[in-house]
Image (cartoon, coloured by chain):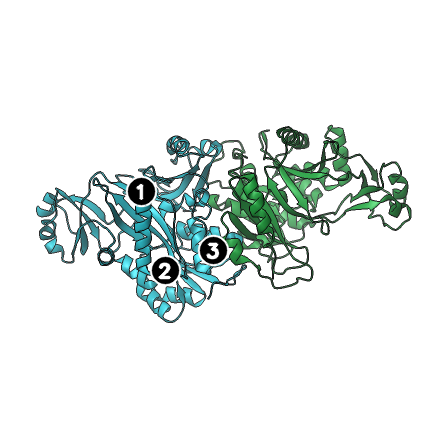
Chain colours: A cyan, B green
Amino acid sequence: MNKSVKLPADIRIGVIGGGQLGKMLIEASRPWNVKYTVLENDLHCPASSVADKVILGGLKDAEGIRKLASGCDVLTFEIEHINSDALLEIEESGKTVIPSARALKTIQDKGIQKLFYREHGIPTADFLICDNPSNLAESVKSFAGGKVVIKQCTGGYDGKGVDIVAKTEIEAGVFKSPGPCVVEHFHANITEYSVIVAADRYGNVVAYPLIEMYFNPQSNLVEFLFSPAETTADLEADCRSIAMRAVKALRSPGLFAVELFVNQNAEVLVNEIAPRPHNSGHHTIEGSYTSQFEQLNRILLGLPLGNTDMVQPAAMINLVGGEGQNGFYKLKFTEQLLSEPGVYVHLYNKTEIRPHRKMGHITVMAESLQALLEKAGKVREWAVFE
Amino acid sequence: MNKSVKLPADIRIGVIGGGQLGKMLIEASRPWNVKYTVLENDLHCPASSVADKVILGGLKDAEGIRKLASGCDVLTFEIEHINSDALLEIEESGKTVIPSARALKTIQDKGIQKLFYREHGIPTADFLICDNPSNLAESVKSFAGGKVVIKQCTGGYDGKGVDIVAKTEIEAGVFKSPGPCVVEHFHANITEYSVIVAADRYGNVVAYPLIEMYFNPQSNLVEFLFSPAETTADLEADCRSIAMRAVKALRSPGLFAVELFVNQNAEVLVNEIAPRPHNSGHHTIEGSYTSQFEQLNRILLGLPLGNTDMVQPAAMINLVGGEGQNGFYKLKFTEQLLSEPGVYVHLYNKTEIRPHRKMGHITVMAESLQALLEKAGKVREWAVFE
């Protein structure tokens, strides 16, 4: 495929995973009528309501991925925890896979991901890889400070698989090793950011404005974010430049979220890269000229990259299940949310609520960052279910 | 249903008609996962790709409409040329029909529509209703000027059924009467506008900013428009106030487009009302905090009306089939269109192109009206198919 792709594009896209990211990716493609097939182990998955076709199958099941690939021209994924060997095999057979299976393999294992940063001179927190659980206590000794960060090499997701642990707990055997893991220096009092980076098939790479993120301390899920970040132009430029450098080093087209943090010494360090649309980019649906989802559609279709500027400052608030919430759900403050100008409610079409489950999100827009933060503060109070 | 509707809303909506307006209405509802069924006589209609269900049936077929109604909680339509008697019967049986069947009946017949304006003191061009074609020559005699406007009472659509005719051609019998029609005073050198007006179920009525429209002289289709209009605050206020007055007089919830024009004496006159989302409101998808389609979803679901302010000035350019274009189609300037910041391409999922057929539209956004008109001027050159 070359750069002369025209609309309507007669390209069938397959997505491994049918969650909310797949749903919003397909929603963004509706004005272009792209044919989307989704692979998911649940016919009532969030994306099922908008996909042209759902193939029932596990995301680690090579057969399902091959079946999806056989009916599609371009293959992508909306979650990292998939069978990357099957993806590699399909890519090597000549099918277009975006992002590349190789880039996914680099990211899937947090140990390999950290080594990739080191190899490419991407700043990241000091680390050791601990393959053998029995060596964990020995591994943490070389780290300064009383705490370390323990990240499972594989399988972590949505705040799970990452723990901040006191070294004494590890040494005393109170903390159980999760298996092969990355041991990282713990940086206290950090500010967390994200940069959405888009890379097309022709070597062009663009970045969105810096996103400032706040996490829920219990669930470790992003709870609230806004963009542009409340910081200096220099730091914004540093973060964007490091994020673009990291994505360029991956040498793969795709839409990536680069999570970074700034420590007490004002150093920018890359935390991790997600090779797909990301929770930290949901505000781009209304807040940016080109949403992260439209951007990925452009990349998948071989169309030019879209403008990453913001139309207005925007914030995002996750709608997650509260403690003890199960089954049936309704928003508690629908009237207030929908009466507030510049507020957008997105629900993910999930059949049941569960504690900490991402059920939807709210975008807030305003003409200035100050007005945005005031409005978002009010709206956060309404982001609950009955 | 009362105003305490909450999201997710377990309401099934039925739409009579599955064209692009139905398609965009459903697209706007995807973040809320509303269940939509469409009635259309073509299973491959534009809305088919996004509707949950398509019922095959003619829009004038009472049986089809009844079948649609029986499976839905709320009924709406995206075209006026439907069986309004069947709709009335369904409404009288207690089903929620928005807009009301009575409002549709007032609008369906252009003669009744003109009498409605007169009855409610809504300014409109002077007219006579000519029920008997043989009286047409006699009817036009009382009009000043060399030309009159002849509007078929029923069946006109998308620029068809309206003619500007020299009185001499009518008197000489060169112009054939289209049957029952409205004869209207012809106003030369008018500027045409539209106001999108939303009325909820609780008596609230809001208007969008004034839209300035330019029509193709051959096809009589709107070709280009922008909002806010390039006019005085007084004229804008007049137009919005007259449009809201006209919609209030209809005494029906719904989303309406009030087409108006200003004549050489700076009088504002209502041309006609469309009781549905309208081509003149497509720029609201990106340009307004609440698009005309989201607004109608809110009304249908019994949710609060959304803010009608614009995020930025916006223009809309129709993508229509050119002379001699039939069958297969591709945009000619995809690369240029998608490389220009603030440009959005919407394609309607039509299987074949035909001359003057609406195939899609382009929205253009910019920070100022001046920048918008410059950009839109450039983009208009690219709004063609190969």
Identify the image quadrant of the C terminus of chain B: bottom right
Graded by Cα atoms within 10 Å as few (under 14), some (14 to 19) or many (20 or more), the crowding at tag 2 reads: many
Can residue A356 be seen here? The reply is: no
**Dot 2: chain letter:** A
Q: Is residue A101 left or right of residue B267?
A: left
Q: Which mark is residue A234?
A: 1
- Residue A5 place in picture, x, y as percent: 50, 62
User: Is residue B40 left or right of A342 when viewed as pictured?
Assistant: right
Tell me if A151 is positioned left or right of A20 in this view. left
The mark that comes first in sequence, 2 or 1, is 2
| Mark 2 and mark 1: Cα distance apart in space | 30 Å
Expressed as whole percent of the image width and height from the top left, the position of residue B300 reads: 56, 39
Q: CA distance from mark 2 to mark 3?
A: 20 Å
A344 w.r.t. B23: above or below: above
In this rendered view, identify the residue nearer to me: B359 or B385. B385
Q: Amino acid at mark 3?
A: Ala
Looking at the image, is mark 3 or mark 1 earlier in the sequence?
3
Amino acid at pointer 1: Asp
Q: Residue B242: where, in percent of width, then height?
A: 67, 30
The residue indicated by pointer 2 is A99
Q: Is residue A249 visible?
A: yes
Q: Chain of mark 1?
A: A
